Image (cartoon, rainbow, N blue to C red):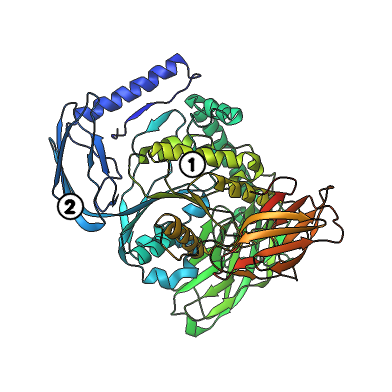
Amino acid sequence: MNHILVHEAHNRRISSKYRLLLSLFSFLTFISLTSEAAIKLPRLIGNSMVLQRDHPIHLWGWADPGELIEINFRGHQRTTKANSMGDWQVYLPAMPAGGPYDMVIQGKNTIRLKNILLGDVWFCSGQSNMELPISRVAPKYQREIDTAESFTIRQFKVPLRYDFNITATDVASGNWKSVTPDEVLNFSAVGYFFAKHLQEKLRVPIGIIHCAVGGSPIEAWLSEEAIQKYPDLLAKTQRYQDSLLVDSIKKIDKRKTEIWHATLDAKDKGLTGVPKWYESSYTFQTDQVIQIPGKWDECGSVWLKKDFSVPSSLLTKEAMLHLGRIVDSDQAYINGVLVGSTGYQYPPRRYKIPPGLLKPGKNTLVVRVVTQSKHGEFIPDKDYALTTYSDTISLKGDWSFQVGALTQAFPIDLVTFQYQPTGLSNAMAAPLFPYSIKGILWYQGESNIATYQSYTALLRDLINEWRKKWNDQNLPFLYVQLPNYNPKQQQPTESAWANLREAQRLGLKTAHTNMAVAIDLGEWNDIHPLDKKNIGKRLALLALKNVYHQKGMVASGPILKSWKVKGNRVELNFDDQGAALDLRPENNLLGFTLAGTDGKFVWAKTEVRGNTIILSAPAIQQPAKVRYAWADNPIAGLYNTAGLPASPFEIDLSKQAP
């Protein structure tokens, strides 16, 4: 049993028997701790850590009850005693940036921590676009990765863990890592580029605590106390506090998944036939052809084959197979040998080809694709090619196509427990609150698009709760507004993505928050756009201006300041944020729409006078609402000359301007 101490969460519905079991578990954990007679530290406090500069340094841990602990760091000595539960904590005085330093913590045992830096620590949280590691965006930044070397940028990655009953006092694993070409591949891409930009400007060490989970909705990061006013979320939490129920659901869902895949595999003629369809001796028995990239309407498994020719000059070079993105999972074979597989639709397919597998002249690529719903697809506008450092063999065009087996759609009633309310708050975020930080970065929202109505309130509650936990009501909170996604819309339209972006924009009403606009940094065909460098830079600009108070910084695009209605015209006045308006029309449009009392939006004619944009439309005589950049993937032509875009927005003209 490890040394993680836990305590019971507030839970009125847990049976008295289950409460007794929890108490017993906590007691046994405590006995295990104290019987070892040794100082123990949380994993955040370790070799190579970055401590927050210019802020009292909080250190804590566990020991025998009453054990005397002495800490020596940079000439400062502190002593304390563990309390009756074995907990201890001390505060060292605030210190300026610098390092590396060593620290000695001594009780019945001695712990020597080395390579400690003092700098700024940023907590990076959210869902997949914050979690996404550098390795996923590597092709876009390969040169930077190859030369990445920074002693003063470090990351602590918090592993996935969830719990609905107990609040952990330590994370399950982890340690601090510095930037090297190998280690940087595991850094949050957004967090790394943010840290890199800050470090270059401030010349102080930057630490990032990478605490994000792909697909997680915002409510998973809130505590049970914070969701008391949301009955539906509270009910979910209380339901899953029954661990026997959770275990039962896990077993049932695991069995459903296994049966679905086993049934499909047993029916798949490509796997059961002799020879198997991926083997070099097999010849496809159909004349059916599909264009790649392209899609098909089948649920089950399909097999696709492409012959390609390799010149002898490329055989000695390291080669990579690029298969873009595929819906849903795939296994790729070259000349009968498996070269790569991916279990779900979002990751880019980049498979290294083993040396000696390619041969001069004709080679054969076979891909088995399993689709879990009504259609499968090789996503357009992605790379489909075999590449070396200097050469590219395109794999686009005609592919042979055969159905292996058809089946029912994959079960949709499975429960993803790390997405349920409070689970990540208890197990991942809570253990980090004692560690002093400079601020918070948040990139999340895709998983709350269907429930956008409550997002602004949930975001405010998250900000307030984390500030309370870190005991700093002014703790900076910087977040990313969702980028453009899905096919481009050329007509005014309703949009769930736009609704969520507006909910995010309204989060700016909470003090000491800043939002990085990313409406031009997305990809229509990828919910995980590659351009994480500009996301990180825009967050860093906000930090430099609003947290570090550097003068002369232009950190955001134009911001709507006020509006007036004059007859059938609307005047919008913008704060350009220190750089003049820069208009980038698309199809002669900037992205503004008007609606009358009937609520139907039409494109607005725009006239620009300095920082004022005047809107009108022949069909609208009584303007009631204005929208800008309102679509999943909108026309968004309003920037400033610093190259930063304005946020999408919606305003009700019957209300008073702010």
Q: Earlier in the sequence, mark 1 or mark 2?
A: 2
Most extreme residue toward the bottom is 313
Quarter-of-image position of residue 454: top right
Q: Residue at the spot x=45%, y=23% of the render? A: 10
Out of 319 and 160, give the one closest to the viewer: 160
Question: In this image, 203 relative to 362: left or right?
Answer: left
Out of 401 and 140, give the one closest to the viewer: 140
Out of 461 and 273, give the one closest to the viewer: 461
Q: In the image, which disc is placed on residue 105?
A: none
SS for dot 2: strand
Q: Residue at the spot x=31%, y=34% of the render? A: 4
Are there few (<14), some (14-19), or many (20+) residues within 10 Å of tag 1?
A: many
**Which amino acid type corresponds to the residue marked 2 in the rendered image?**
Asp
| Res. 290 visible in picture | no
Q: Position of residue 331 (x, y in %)?
A: 56, 59
3D distance between C-alphas at marks 1 and 2:
34 Å
Question: In this image, 555 relative to 549: left or right?
Answer: right
Q: Position of residue 520 (x, y in %)?
A: 60, 64
Where is 160 relative to 493, above or below? Answer: above
SS for dot 1: helix
Quarter-of-image position of residue 590: bottom right
Q: Residue at the spot x=80%, y=61% of the render? A: 616
Quarter-of-image position of residue 5: top left
Q: Position of residue 633 (x, y in %)?
A: 67, 59
Where is 47 relative to 199, above or below? Answer: above
Q: In the image, which disc is placed on residue 102?
A: 2
Q: Position of residue 212 (x, y in %)?
A: 46, 48
Are there few (<14), some (14-19), or many (20+) residues within 10 Å of tag 2?
A: some
The residue beneath circle 1 is 463
Most extreme residue toward the top is 16
